[in-house]
Amino acid sequence: MNRTIAYITFRGMLGRRRALLLFALPALLLVLAVTLRATGNNDLDISTVVLQRFALGTVLPLLGLIAGTGVIGPEIDDGQIMYILTKPISRSVIITTKLAVAIALIIGFGVIPTLVAGLILTGTLAQLAVAFAVAVLVGGTAYCAVFVALAVYSRFAVTIGLMYALIWESLIGNFAPGAKNLSIQQWSLAIAKSLTSATAVKADISLGAAVVLLIIVSAGGTLLATTRLRTLSVTSAD
Amino acid sequence: MTTPSATPSAIHDIGYRHYDGPRLGRAYILRSLFVQNLRAAYGLGRPAKAKALPFILFAFMLVPALGSIALVALSKEPRLLIRYSAYTIDLQILVAIFLATQSPVLASRELRSHVIPLYFSRPVGALDFVLAKFGAFTTALFVLLATPVTLLYAGALATRDPKAKSLLNARPGDTPSHVDSVGTHTLHYLGALTGCLLFALVLAALGLVIAAWTPRRGFGVAAVMAVYMLSSTIVLIVQGIATTQGHYEVAGWAGLFSVFNLIDIVQAKLLGATSTMDVPTSALAGPAAALLCAAIVAGALAILYTRFRKAGTS
């Protein structure tokens, strides 16, 4: 961990208009939760749908994409990464710092809003809020590791990440159930299922497998990003 | 120095000898900008990496149409053809990905590299600049949406049973396969093309505004996608809740908040198509949705105009 890199990355992520996008995602989740609570549509099934489809299925991949690629992608793109790479800082420190910032953003804009939204919707009923907050944290960590690695590897990281989240996890996952075995969203859902007694939470994969896969993907993403950063060649943008 | 407004000269005229010959004029500028932006939307004139995604998405858009035509040809059952007006809505994820990845190409690149003042130092107005961009992106999207629908139409006519009757002289007892006539197909096809144009206009407007608002690389893509995913998911959840409680009218009106539902309402209410998603039964819904579309396009053009004009002065 390097404090200066972390500070610069935070400033880059939260500067000006970009922060608005990050704030808008959890804000919508909270508005939805409050509206549903106010209109009395907050039974366990609806709350599960909101937390599963909206918090875990929509807000989290977007947040992971923005945070994961945003902490390192633009710097590689405009060549600023050179100012860090030419300093005597180990590559693994750079990647872990970037990853830590991304995860901190996930906690601030994903985990806490999910917990609050869950509490607004159901209170502490069936531990639903806590279960999904933990799932968002674990899933968010995996998303960030994958997307940081993607951003180091390709300049089209956001597009590739989007296609993974949209086409693989949502579209193909619906038609070919096998694709769900390789979906961060499903692994997180398995974690959520093990923590709540709500029957509406269904997962297609066992808890053990999910935990192992999440650890492999998170560690693998970090490792790949570090290796790639050692041999990074900065080419001109666009 | 001559006064800037007195002559159409640009910065290269530093007052030594004036050029008095004919100038190519505003239409030429507009056309050049339009062509350049249209080519950029498909990555033409840029490296292979920039071409890959738009062309892959374009190819994917055609696959279901070809499959559907093959199915009709083999089964002799015209009802199996995908409905023209439903095609864009069925493949909305591909359309959304195209929109998200290509709108920053048109709207953010010049902002990011701060070259807008260079455009405006020539006789190019901010309005022309924005109109050319909007027109080019609308055309690019329309090509993406209308090509598979046209393919479906051609396939339907090629595989049609010539003995089928026209919709116009169809009798109440006729089965749907009997109304498989050229007239019916053409009518539905033209309706769907209008729908495609409407989709192209509204999507281009939204995509360009969002991308111009977040020029940082990657953020534009994520922002356009976020707007699409959040709006459609929220509308889906609200419609789900409203439908289970029997508030079908509320479910229909909720569609105004998601682009694809919005234009589905216009298609169903004003263009004579069968609705693909929840649509309000009220007769007001069609005009309201159409008005909203017009407001989105007009608002987007106004925002883009001020955005680029400001970027041109700094």
Image (cartoon, rainbow, N blue to C red):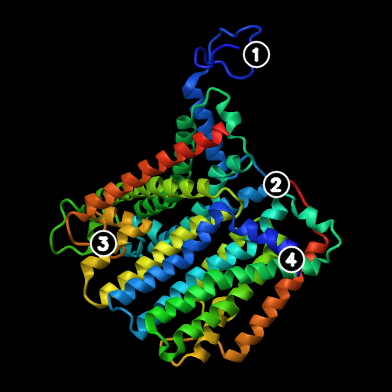
Question: In this rendering, does residue B82 appear at all?
Answer: yes
Residue B247's place in the image compared with A207, above or below, is above
The residue singled out by tag 1 in the image is B14
Q: Is residue B184 left or right of residue B44?
A: left
Pointer 1 and pointer 4 on the same chain: no
What's the distance in space between the residues labelled 2 and 1, CA to CA?
A: 33 Å
Name the residue beneath numbered marker 4. Answer: A3
Q: Indicate the chain on which mark 2 is placed.
A: A
Q: Give amino acid for label 2.
A: Ala
Give the mark, 3 or 1, whose residue is nearer the N terminus: 1
Q: Please state which amino acid type lies under the numbered disc 4.
A: Arg
Give the x, y percent position of residue B250: 24, 66
Q: Quadrant of the C terminus of chain B?
A: top right
Residue indicated by mark 3: B253
Farthest residue to the right: give it: A88
Q: Are marks 2 and 1 on the same chain?
A: no
Amino acid type assigned to the residue bearing label 1 in the image: Ile
Label 2 to label 3: alpha-carbon separation: 44 Å
Q: CA distance from mark 4 to mark 3?
A: 50 Å
Q: Nearer the viewer, mark 3 or mark 1?
A: 1
Mark whose residue sits in front, 1 or 4: 4
Question: Contact (CB < 8 A) between labels 1 and 4?
Answer: no
Q: Secondary structure at mark 3?
A: helix
Q: Which residue is mark 2?
A: A237
Query: Residues at badges 3 and 1 in contact (C-beta under 8 Å)?
Result: no
The answer to which image quadrant residue B73 occupies is: bottom left
Residue drawn 62% across and 91% down? A208
Secondary structure of residue under mark 2: loop
Q: Element type at marker 1?
A: loop
